Image (cartoon, rainbow, N blue to C red):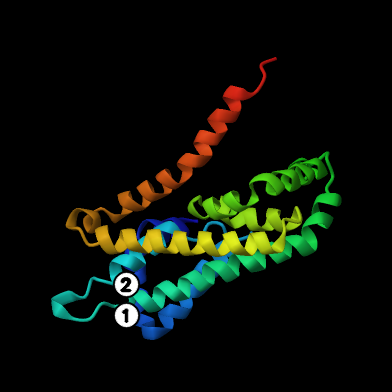
Amino acid sequence: MARIIDFLLHVDTHLLEAVRTYGSWVYGILFAIIFAETGLVVTPFLPGDSLLFAIGALCVSGADGAAAPLSLPVVGLLLIAAAYLGNTVNYFIGRAIGPRVFQASNNDTIFGKLLNRKYLDQAHAFFELHGGKAVALSRFVPIVRTFLPFVAGAAKMAPRQFMLYNLAGGVGWVSVCLGAGVLFGNIPIVKKNFSLVALGIVFVSMLPIAFEYLKSRKSAPRT
């Protein structure tokens, strides 16, 4: 856990070390990280927003006139593909096994309560009404972007609708985070305080969840 936290807080340093150690192979490593972060429900702890921000910074930070360590067009297209394919795999895994997972849940356990069949039915109704917007916007919320494609698949969201908004969300997420890194990642105060910046990125990303939680608490009937 300590290593994971260290990696999240100093992803810029570790990324630069990876570029120096693995050279062009780092593109494959970055593809795998983004693919897993969006495509596997067991790896929501992997860096997403902060990693993309650091990548954007490295795309324009060549020292002493040297070429930047990473190519922005190459890494941009590669990571959009990773984000799209990751969500797609996650969706089809959810579509294949999700209903059985919810159906087999035991309501007397913690997991049973979380995987209650009625929640799946509610999710289906939700995706029928708001599915596209939810798929696209979830890209910008850590943890949610890892689990939502699985739930969308389990809830039988229409594949064509999911794919369309999956692509739109992936392009928007990667472009915004990389662009922010390109524009702000090499500002001296940002480079010197990247740990705080990384925490700030996570904090801002989690605000939608906090707002929705407070909104639901406020609208919930009091007993």
Whether residue 192 sits left or right of residue 100 in the image: it is left
Horizontal side, residue 185 vs residue 15: left or right: left
The image quadrant where one finds the C terminus is top right
Residue at numbered disc 1: 20
Check contact, mark 2 vs mark 1: CB within 8 A.
yes
Q: Which residue: 65% across, 60% down?
A: 162
Q: Is residue 128 above or below residue 74?
A: above
User: Where residue 14 sits in the image (x, y, percent)?
Assistant: 36, 68
Disc marking residue 126: none
Q: Which mark is residue 16?
A: 2
Is residue 30 visible to us here? Answer: no
Relative to the observer, which residue lies in front, 141 or 45?
141
Residue 203 or residue 157, whichever sits in front: 157
Report the residue at 57% width, 23% height from top. Answer: 218
Q: Residues within 10 Å of mark 2 (few under 14, many from 20)?
A: some
State the SS at label 1: helix
x and y percentages locating residue 46 in the rendered image: 50, 61
Left/right of residue 212 with respect to residue 62 in the rendered view: right
199 lies left or right of 1: left
Please name the amino acid that badge 1 sits on.
Arg
Q: Residues within 10 Å of mark 1 (few under 14, many from 20)?
A: few
* SS category of the residue bearing label 2: helix
* Residue 17 picture location, percent across and down: 33, 74
**What residue sits 83% from the left and 48% below the top?**
105
Q: Amino acid at mark 2?
A: Leu
Give coordinates of residue 106: x percent, y percent: 84, 45
Residue at the image point whose x is 43% and y is 57% from the top: 49
Looking at the image, can residue 205 be seen? yes
Q: In which quarter of the view is residue 135 placed?
A: bottom right
